[in-house]
Image (cartoon, grey):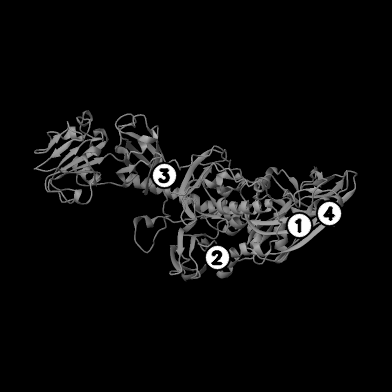
Amino acid sequence: MFENFLMKRKHIVSFAILFYLSAGSGIAQNIDSTIQKYADDYGQERVYFQFDKSTYIPGETIWFKAYLMNGFYPVNDSKNFYADWTDDHGNLLFRTISPIVDGTTNGQFNIPANYSGKFIHVKAYTKWMLNFDSAFLYEKDILILGPKGNSPELKSNVISSLQFFPEGGDIIEGVGNKIAFKANDQWGHPVKIKGFIQNNKGKLIDSLRILHDGMGYFFIFPQAGESFTAKWKDEKGKEYSTDLPGIKKFGVSMQVVVSGTRRIFNISAAPDVATSLQTVTIIGTMHQREVFKVSKEINTGVATGVIPTQDIPSGILTITVFDKRWQPLAERITYINNQEYYFHPEMTVQHWGLSKRARNEIVITVPDSLQANMAVSVTDAAINADSSDNIISHLLLTGDIKGQVYNPYFYFSNNSDSVSQDLDLVMLTHGWRKFNWEQVAAGKLPNILYPKDTSYLNLSGRVYGVLPSDLRQGANIIMIVSQQKQGGKVVVLPIEADGSFNDLSLILMDTAHIYYQLPKKHFGDASVRFMENLLPPLRANISATGKFNNNVNDTTGNFHHWLLADEMNKLLLQYEGKVLENVTITSKTKSPLEVMDKKYTSGLFSGGDSYQFDIMNDPLASASPNIFYYLQSKVAGLQINTTSTPPTLTWRGGAPGLYVDEIPTDADMVSSIPASDVAYIKVFRPPFMGSFGGSNGAIAIYTRRGDDIKSSPGKGLANNIVTGYTLIREFYAPNYDNFKPENERKDVRTTLYWNPQVITTPQKNQVTLTFYNNDVTKSFRVTIEGMTKDGQLAHVEQIME
């Protein structure tokens, strides 16, 4: 299966060559080369979210894993991923920024405990995706259960609508036309209707027969001056009248018949139009790659052909008909499902534990020819679950078409003729990613406003306001980077000729406070912008209305879910209150300098024979321009000459070593740090054993960190607060084989296990996962989704009972 999968992906180019009949013009060659350029350099990315479960209550955490594809393969170029979480009024609740590794990333969002909306909306994208149609950004409304598990009743005020979609794009006069239709409500869900089609003379043409989920089709043969109207009723009997699209005199009608692994096309034109056209050219594209091209004579008014599809990869195939001047005449999409996209992770249960707090052990095995990246969730099987959409249906279908598709995974449930025909109705009634053929024929490429994020959110920026000649003189920017729980770090980076600076090794997480200094010469009016590759928040947010939710309303499952989750939240609040009430801390009191030493120092810098200075609590420190002035006359034998540039130091016949946050530095760097930005100083008597050359002692300067930082912009060094990646938490699951006080609490978790980093390789193709039951669950739902390095997808859902 895997070899067949790769062959289909690689075969798409050779298939195009075999099925190609030259149109023999310079424009044709230009179109070919432009399409190839689109495929190679302008491939469009798409996103799918896997959640630990499908619904939540306020106060819970939404755990997610995102999978990203470009064409047939996982995203490789884009490195940064954005997710905007908004409420039912369109207000931004939170923004997640995550690094993309091997086409995936993961994270979490905490639902506010006081959230009262019925849904939370998540919009997800990369910077590259913003260059193209916003309809293809990831959009999802997540159901938030109300009191006692009540879910919003979307059907209370249903507004039905009826839309018509001529196959090929237009209704053409003088030939047969297939017209598809779709009846749905304001949320995109299918509705039932009854009605008929009549012409402008009141003649009955055909009835409206729904074939699947609000969709159907009929045929018309319009004559000159004829128009058509639909008369129909909704489920409540309300009557409507909807006009069909206007009729064109010039053009062609295209019909495509799904016949197993073949697509039979029929192109029709009125006699005078056919004489004018003489020939038409049909091009097939998939993910902006040319799959086939064929020219056909249409002198007789009809052009037919057969497209073999057994060697085409699965996905949406776009078929476009052109005239001899390369003007598009008709276009439609058809779905190819050769089922080569799937890999099957096999799950076996090694240890069953359905009783209270029992241990469970499952083994997941992937074929040893694959490198797979998966996520696994285990939930109470009795809570509600939405299986209408998953990684396969989204990345292979809904991520590439416009509009809501109701219950999309149904179309992958089997490959029967009936399901294929139902899927073809989806193809006829939804929009898709389209070429602008006028621009393609002219050789024009997309206008790119957002270059690809090809680097992670590492420490970077650019200096502005300096002449190019001054930038070429090898200047450095000196920075103190303070990140949460990491303290301060001194970084010295060269400023490139274009003003940029970059440290690939320093990835920024959460927020960082950056103090910086530029050279005094030529940089007096310079400014610095950090993290220019970070995308600012989007201005337009979508309200969480339920439009982007499949509305799978499991009343019993919702109620069971709400009962357990609500009790769990109450237990957590109760437990936190008891901890605050009962915990008493006793310890030996440490001196302020001992506290400082423990907080700031490590390794050989900790303890030792030294002078210690608490700069934060010394009122004289703020009066000193830098720490060299401050240390003068404070250490016996240490000579400091502050009249030279940089200052010089002598102790016992030599110069002591200088360190900022335990990193070796020089006097020039130290003199640039204001005393107000220093927390603690240790002056080690000779010899200092913390580094080579410590025979003359050492001076260790520690900058303020976290809530120590009290300096404000305009005092001391210039500074900025910059945003990095959102911190990724680890899912907590108890281990009941070990005794811990917190294990004595009642356990009614609805998500028993979540692991977004289940990785297999050809060398290690098995993974063993262990989780523990709660106090009440009787059966588990295990969901496994994933993607291989070569773009194969997996969705497995299994009940343990």
Per the rendering, the mark at residue 724 is 3
Q: Earlier in the sequence, mark 4 or mark 2?
A: 4
In the rendered structure, which amino acid carries the disc numbered 1?
Answer: Leu
Quadrant holding the N terminus = bottom right
> How far apart are the alpha carbons under marks 1 and 3?
51 Å
On screen, residue 694 above or below 420: above
Callout 4: helix, strand or loop? loop
Q: Earlier in the sequence, mark 3 or mark 2?
A: 3
Q: Which of label 1 and label 3 is nearer to you?
A: 3
Q: Earlier in the sequence, mark 1 or mark 4?
A: 4
Name the residue at 77% across, 57% down.
Answer: 255
Q: Which of label 3 and label 2 is nearer to you?
A: 3
Callout 3: helix, strand or loop? loop
Name the residue beneath numbered marker 4. Answer: 176
Q: Which of label 4 and label 3 is nearer to you?
A: 4
Q: Position of residue 281 (x, y in %)?
A: 73, 55
Name the residue beneath numbered marker 1. Answer: 211
